[in-house]
Image (tube, coloured by chain):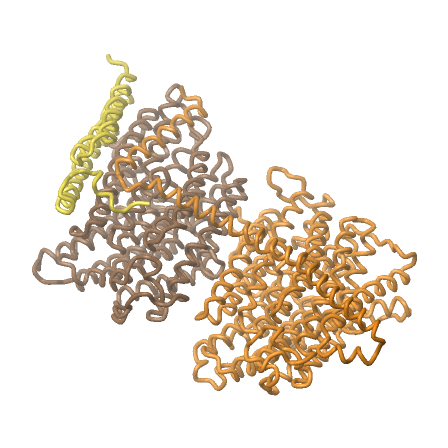
Amino acid sequence: MSLLQIEPTSWLFALSSLGPTVVLVLSALAVLAIDSLSPDARSNTRLAATAAAGTLIALGITVWYLLAGTGQPATGGAISLFSGAIVVDGMGLFFTAIFTSVAALVVVASYDYLEDDANPAAFYSLLLFATTAMSLMAVANSLATVFISLEMASLPSYALVAYLKTNRGSVEAGLKYFLIGAVSAAVFAFGISLVYAATGSLLLPDIATAIGDVTDLAGILGVGILMVAGGFLFKTASVPFHFWAPEAYEGAPAPVSAFLSSASKAAGFAVAFRVFAEAFMPALDVAVDWGLLFGILAVVTMVLGNFAAATQTNVKRMLAYSSIGHAGYALIGLAAVTAGAGANNATVMGAAMAHLLVYGFMNTGAFLFIAMIERWGVGRTFEDYAGIGRKAPMASMAMAVFMFSLAGLPLFGGFFSKYFLFLGAINAGFWWLAAVGAVTSALSLYYYSRVVKALWLEEPTGNLDALDSKPTGLYAAVIVAGVITVLLLPGFGPVIETAEAAAAAVFA
Amino acid sequence: MVPVEYYLLLSSGLFCIGLFGILTRRNALYFLMSVELMLNAANINLVAFSFYWGNLTGQTFALFAIALAAAEVAVGIGIILALYRNFGDVDVMQAATMRW
Amino acid sequence: MVTAFDYVPAIVLLPFVSFVVALFIGKQLPKKGAYGGIAATAGSLLLSLWVLASVAGGGAHQETYWTWAEGVGSQPFTLEFGALIDPLSALMLVIVTLIATLVHVFSLGYMNDEGERDLPRYYAGLGLFTASMLGFVIADNLLMAFMFFELVGLCSFLLIGFHFREPGPPSAAKKAFLVTRFGDYFLLVGVVAVFATFGTAAFAGAESFPALAEGALDGTVDVWTPGGLDTMTWFTVVGLLVLGGVIGKSAQFPLHTWLPDAMEGPTPVSALIHAATMVAAGVYLVARMYGFYALTPTTLGIIALVGGFTALFAATMGLVKEELKQVLAYSTISQYGYMMLALGSGGYVAAVFHLTTHAFFKALLFLGAGSVIIAMHHNENMWDMGGLKNKMPVTYWTFLAGSLALAGIFPFAGFWSKDEILYEALIHAGSEPLLFAGYAMGLLAVPVTAFYTFRMVFLTFHGNARSEIARNPEPVRWNVKGPLSVLGALAVVTGGINMVPVQKVLGIEGIDYLHLWLDNHWGGIEGLSSHHYAEIDPYSSTYPFGTEVATVLAGAAISLALAVAGLLLAWKLYNVAEPVEHTDKLGGAKTLLYNNYYQDEFQVWLADRTRGVSGGADTFDQGVVDGVVNGVSSVSLFGGDRIKRIQTGVVGNYALLLTVSLTALLVVFALLGGWF
């Protein structure tokens, strides 16, 4: 099926199926419009309200669709649009829910962060455009839409990281992110061209069908799949395409770090899960055992991220490395996939999706706490955090929740998601992945508890008078993220069920 | 007619030249140009195999890829400009204050 | 009709409510939340007694309160919260609530009267601690048990580190938390393995994992094992993984190092931790899933060996400690070693018996120590005490009762339970020689225990006061004496619940109440009886002294003789405030000189010897065991430090590394896939 043979698609139907995406892009344009209608007015409040409304409405629509069963087996299965280039289904909606939730939290938090900024419209619109692109990534069903939406998400992200253009750290972070991103994009594009060369199609289902007939071009296909995997590894900050992550997260404005490490990472996994589950399953036997590839990379990523995080002195950089470690956990969702093990594959991939959702809240919350600290100008190292618990108990309590949840202590949402992930891996016969995951989790408790210890148990070293100001938006975002992280423990049942059903539909 | 394998060799060669440029050039602008070479290597494949398979998917996608490359350069130049303002140079190796 | 079982959740929730109340409005309350805590735990105690009575009336109860997650698709696991009330858990509920109530009352004297700061935080911690332990006790599946197990660990972290402004407590709290967490990760893997193997983690019922495991070994049930491993081998591995958590929490060798440090916490907390909650949790878990452990002889052997070794090892270290609470800390480790020895030797009832008696006499000893510490203005060094006997008679007599029980002197509670443990190990040693090693170590630990216990008693209470404070100790009030008296009485009489030796020797039937109780004599749940465990465990009984009665008598005589010997030695060496004049009147000059000479020399010799042996044990403890734990963390940190050097900060290097890794992957997978 080529792009020329266009089937008639009702535009209205297409737009309503892509409701969240449409709302996001409209709100981004609205932000630009507000700014260009009154370019001189400092309209941070109006812009933030518009952006927050856009993300929340998109989130509302997504959740509504999820509950109503849109694109899911209950109402007749996935909705295929634009000659199959886009597919709206449970997985896409699940991931869109993650992106829009994270974006909403980040927008609310940015309201305070951008209080003294000259031109907040650029920030909000870039953020919204990136979110739009991510929501497209979640439903992309052709390598063409995958590549375009992935780049559409990356380009605003580069600009966001370098947003503080007079800050050397921010610019350096933006440069490194951009350069590694450009190389990865080239590798990714070349991989896609090789897959196209071997199979003659870019639509995921067609690729899956064509792989069976690939004979002498199996090598080309294998190289192509590896390079496509490289593009996803970049987006998810996994080894060996992770090099940009520590610096980008450290140098970027903290709300941007929150956005990238939660939403952008989840978006990378969204496409990776769909592309590998839908298109490349038959290649497991023919061209390349990519399950083994992701297994190796998952282990290396978990080890590198957690070990490097253990010796950091800067809290934000520690979180950056921990974010790499968590990419390793989510990679288990791909690594534990084997040919012909349908139900197990869906279980483990669903667990990885659920982990990304929980991670979206706890990690966003943690970075937003850092944003609050940056706003107070307290400092960056563990020592600077000493004694903050007594001056800002609510926020520090929330931070303790995030840290323990990230470590996987059984009081918070992070416990169940890791538990199901490891359980799924063991069930699928990949006990070694679960073992490495458990050991690195044990190590992670060390560096996460350092933060809690500094906040609560140590005497303040510096002057903490700055903490008397209470940034409302940041506080609200951190507390909401904390509450949701706790609520995800009792509410984990529906989450994992939705995720597994969505994953099962993709494998079917 | 030129066998289709030759196009693969050409594109791989171009890709490797681009990669070589990335690994050896310190100037950010050269870095960008090298990335462009790598992207164009992909485009060669797409166009050649579009002809080989007899569909237009590859050619259409190549157009998108070219447009995206242009957008990427626009963002890239912006960041390089900020780099020049802050570090007084466009040397990519110099911005190395954050590490470990 | 409303039965006691309808109130089971309330037993857990009452202390939890007191936690919430103390946390949020504790500052406004009189006594900062203490009364709320006392009321809540006392309420739980009454409900627990009612539950106990209902179980005795033929009831048993299993109920699911809440289902977390239904099994979906290929995930056939349902995760549930439920209660399992059988003789074992009903007994444990009473023990925990009783001790918790007494500790709350005692805290009025130890914390409020001493003018401590931050009391709402203290009482909130106690409430949550009690609630988590009770939740753990009633848990009807392993996952729920694990979650409360973790909560217990977290609470102990908060309470041990209560005095966080001083340098010691936070680091002790951290150590307790990390060391037990190290064990808990094994437990977590074990829980996952149980789920993966059986698809359920329920403790009781035909579909519970012990029942399925039994079926799997009989070949009637199919279970998953990794890589088609032999089921017996795999069950042993699973059992050992779970045991990791037990060893951490119950402070068994080699994860016992956190417990002595945990003495940094307030003394009532130590009492709670040692007698009824955290440390007891480990042993209780093994007893709870004993139907699973009894199936694998190797695991049982390891449990027995670890227990016996810990009992002896910790006891020798107790010999050289100078602080009152330190001696008690090592005695706790040693006593839990005995319980593990009992579990490993098939003595399920004996272990529960010792758990019960130990809970009472160790709580008593800690609270007594707390009373002494109040009197001594928080000086814990025994060499600064002495002569407190007449100044604080209530404390002295109750402490003495507790010490006699700990030393295992007839007819105090500890004698009966310790004797039964050694007896079980002895008669089962015929079928498993490992048990004989456990028995030997357990027996050797008896005189050592008696010796250090009475060394402690004599140094603290007898002789002359060795410091100004000891001459004028601060008086303690009713809120200290009350709990001590209750526990003192229990330490004397608890042995009466299970007088097996008397039954066997005199032939009186029906006075082994605990045996009957745990054997579902009055009611219980099918498959959770001691009778059933005895059927599936791999041991058979042989009587090394001919008949059963002879073995009972001989075993009791040996252990009692050893205990008395240890006591007498302590008497000789340490009950010597003004010995010179005293012995002067008694004997002739020559004998007196000889005895003096002998006594001095022997004291020096023994002190040197024991210092050598137990000092060596101490060095091993501090050097090797701590060294391994520290070593692992240093290696990790060093590794982290090396790994992060890859991130050089120069983006050109990143591009190079990225290219090299991608190329390496391409080459590896090209070779694997045979592309070219």
In the image, what residue occupies the spot 49% across and 36% down? Answer: A338
Identify whether C118 is placed above or below C634.
below
- The residue shown at (18%, 38%) is B91
Q: Give the answer, above or below, for where C100 lies relative to C175.
A: below
Could you tell me if residue A76 is visible in this image? Answer: no
Q: Residue at x 35, y 57 (%)?
A: A64
C49, above or below A492, in the image:
below
Q: Quadrant of the N terminus of chain A?
A: top left
Residue C531 visible: yes
Q: What hue does chain B carry in this figure? A: yellow
Query: Residue C565 or C146: which is nearer the viewer?
Result: C565
Residue C254 falls in image quadrant: bottom right
The chain displayed orange equals: C
Residue B88 image-quadrant placement? top left
Residue A284 pos. (x, y %): 45, 31
Identify the colour of chain A in the image.
brown
In front of the other: A369 or C314: C314
Residue B65 locus on image (x, y percent): 21, 33
Q: Residue at point 61% right, 67% down?
A: C326
The residue furthest front is C589
Lateral position of residue C529 relative to residue C637, left or right: right
Q: Is residue A340 toward the left or the right of residue A100 in the image?
A: right
Q: Position of residue C634 (x, y in %)?
A: 47, 49
| Image quadrant where one finds the C terminus of chain A | top left
Q: Nearer the viewer, residue A344 or C360?
A: C360
Q: Position of residue C109 (x, y in %)?
A: 56, 83
